[in-house]
Every structure is written in structure tokens, then in C-alpha cells.
Amino acid sequence: MLDPKRYNITALKQMSKERFYTCYSGKIFDIDKVWEWLHPKKDIEEKPKKKKEDK
Amino acid sequence: MANCTECSFGLSNTGLPAGCVPILKAARYGILVPTYDSTGARNGIPSSQEINAAYVQSRIDDTDSSKRWYPIGVPFANFTAPKSEAVYEESDFQDKFFIRQGVRTANLELWNSNPQHAGALDSAVCTSISIFLFDKDMKMIGSVLSADASVYYPIRIADQSFSSTWNFAEASTTPKTIVQFDFHQAEEDANLRVLETADDLDISSLRGLLDVYATYSGISVNGVTVDLYTNYGTAQNKGAVSGLLLGDFAINELSPTPGSVAITSVTESSTVSGRYAIVFTAPATIADVHELVITKTKYDFTAVRSNTYTIV
């Protein structure tokens, strides 16, 4: 979705939502989708599952 | 050429080897080289070095401007390098005493050239420079010191003698830059040498670095927008420097707390070529002074780096 030759994806993922929207509103097309792409719910859901498996 | 001031000098043997002897053909291309680097050492090519495309390109891209090679970039036309008559003093009895050899003056034309390029060449008058010449067969012409053949040197140009004058096109002619310079009087014809180059070297395709300049806008604690351009273009539409990527950019804070500034993104405008929006990873502080450091071959970003901006 974002070209890693132009965006530091790791740094973007660590940005707060407020700062991300301040810096990129009007600069990135469909900013809401990009935010979701950077923070997929799948990852958040998967983490507790892994913990259960460990137990 | 004979130096008659040396007491030990005698007549030299004049034999020639059987077969082919390298001949200096008319110069077609040139590369200017600072005569001395920043340490005061004379710039030259170690005789063990193969003169191939990679080596020459690395010299052109040298980050040390005092060692860098500066290709003239346009083929020579109408190259001549005549030598004026030797200077003698004559007594009232018409005894002739040799004073010095004449001065060799090179004249050449660069066709279809532009005034910015002529201006860039003209800066050569301000420094001590030398030149490697190339003939149409890509043979390189340099010189050796008779006492030291381990280094091939470019031919020294007499200080302050270099001039380049751009001329308007006329009804039936192209715009031309007329270049003229004198060979340094210490350059002896007998020390000129043909230097062999590798087959992959095509001097006609080599260009010197392009100076890049910056104009900043939209400066804030979150980022900055920069327009990068060269001198080559129209006054309104300067030659945009396009295609740079995040990895080409770095930012340093110069004051009040010197250190590097992390960058999250660098995106070139889709509508204005050479315009880059830069976003800082962490918010900067108002009144911070930054320098933009860009690294990309074929360009010189020194002017960009020295053009600092202040966060507002």
C-alpha cells in the first residue's frame, strides 16, 4: 500500500494516530485505510491466541 | 624540451623504435582536474591503475572536490594548440641567448553549448587546474615527470589563463563556447604521453556532477517541503532533480542540540517534479536549525546542505 522506498513503514507503525493524521491528512489517499493497513486487527487478535497456545 | 640551464645536459640520442610509435591525435574531449588536492599533493593516476570506466566514474563522483575530475562534457571542435616562438636575447653582435620556450595556447570550441555550462567552466580560472585530453580513439593524453614515471599526471594549465566565453547563435550557426588556456611553462612536450584506456571507457558519455540547489516551504515541527533543482532549465522552470527516495535523504539538527533527525517519509509530488515532502519521525522544536544532507551519484548537493532552514 505504501512504497517502502518512500516511507519508513516501521516508523509509521510506531506513530500515534493523532500524529499520523496530523502529518499525512491530505497527503495520503484514503488515509483511514492506510492507518488500518498499518495496524491490522488481525495482529492484535492473534497475540492473545498465541498466549493461549503457549499455555 | 631541453633545459639549457642544467650544466649536465648533453645531446640526447635520437633513435626511434622499429614499428609503431603511439601518436598524439587531435584532442576531442577533456577532463579538468585540480592540480593539487586539499593536502597539497599533486593529483594523478598511479601507473599501476587500469584506466577503465569504473575508475574514471569513481574519480568524477569523488566526494572530495579537490580530488574530483570534472569532464568538460561536450566534444571539442576546432582544437588547436600552437606554441609561440621561443624567446631569445640578442646582443649588439647578434649573439643569440636562449631565454625560454614559447607558450603553448590551446583554443577550442564547444558547439551547441549553453551559458550556464560556460559559466561553470569559467570558474576554473580561480584555481590551479590541469587537464587530461582524449583523442577520438579514447587514447588519453597526460604527462609524466621525467624523474618519476610511477604517476601519470594531467597536463598543467597556466594559472589564470583559462577562459570560457559563451557566444550567441547566429542565423546559420549554433551557440558556442570558446575555451582558451595556456599550457603551464613547466610542461615539457617531451614529457607528454599517450595513456592507454580500457575498452569499456567511453568518455563521450561521461558528464560532471550537477550542482543542486534547494528552496524550502511548508516548514513546521512535523516536516518540510523542499524543491530541488539545477541551474539548467528556464528561469521559471528550473531543471528539477527528480526520482530521489527516502534512503537518499538525511537531516541533521545543527542547533541547539546537534544530532540526526529521523525521517519517516520522503514523497515526491505527483504534480511538481523535484518537489519532496519530508515528514520527521518525531516532532521538531520551533527554532531548531536543520541541514538537509542528500547523497546521490551524479549530483553535488553541497549548496543544499549549506542552505539551512529553521523550524517555525
Image: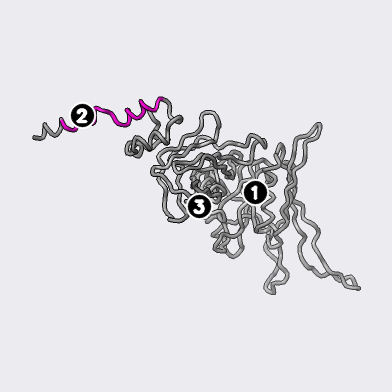
Q: Mark 2 and mark 1 in contact (Cβ < 8 Å)?
A: no
Residues B287 and B277: in front is B287
Residues B14 and B188: in front is B188
**Residue stretch in magenta:** A30-48
Q: Residue at x 51, y 51 (%)?
A: B63
Instruction: Let me know if marks 1 and 2 both belong to one chain.
Output: no
Q: Visible in this render: residue B255? A: yes
Query: Does B194 sit above or below residue A23?
Result: below
The amino acid marked with disc number 1 is: Leu
Q: Residue at x 73, y 56 (%)?
A: B161
Residue, disc 2: A45
A39 horizontally vs B231: left or right: left
The amino acid marked with disc number 2 is: Glu
Q: Which residue of the protein is positioned furthest toward the left in this rendering?
A: A55
Q: Which residue of the protein is positioned furthest toward the bottom in this rendering?
A: B7
What is the chain letter for disc 1? B
Q: Is residue B244 magenta?
A: no
Pointer 3 local density, CA inside 10 Å: few below 14, some 14–19, many at least 20: few
- On the image, the x and y values in percent for residue B307 come to 56, 49
Residue, disc 3: B49
* Res. B133 mark: 1
What is the chain letter for disc 3? B
The amino acid marked with disc number 3 is: Gln
Q: Residue at x 33, y 38 (%)?
A: A16
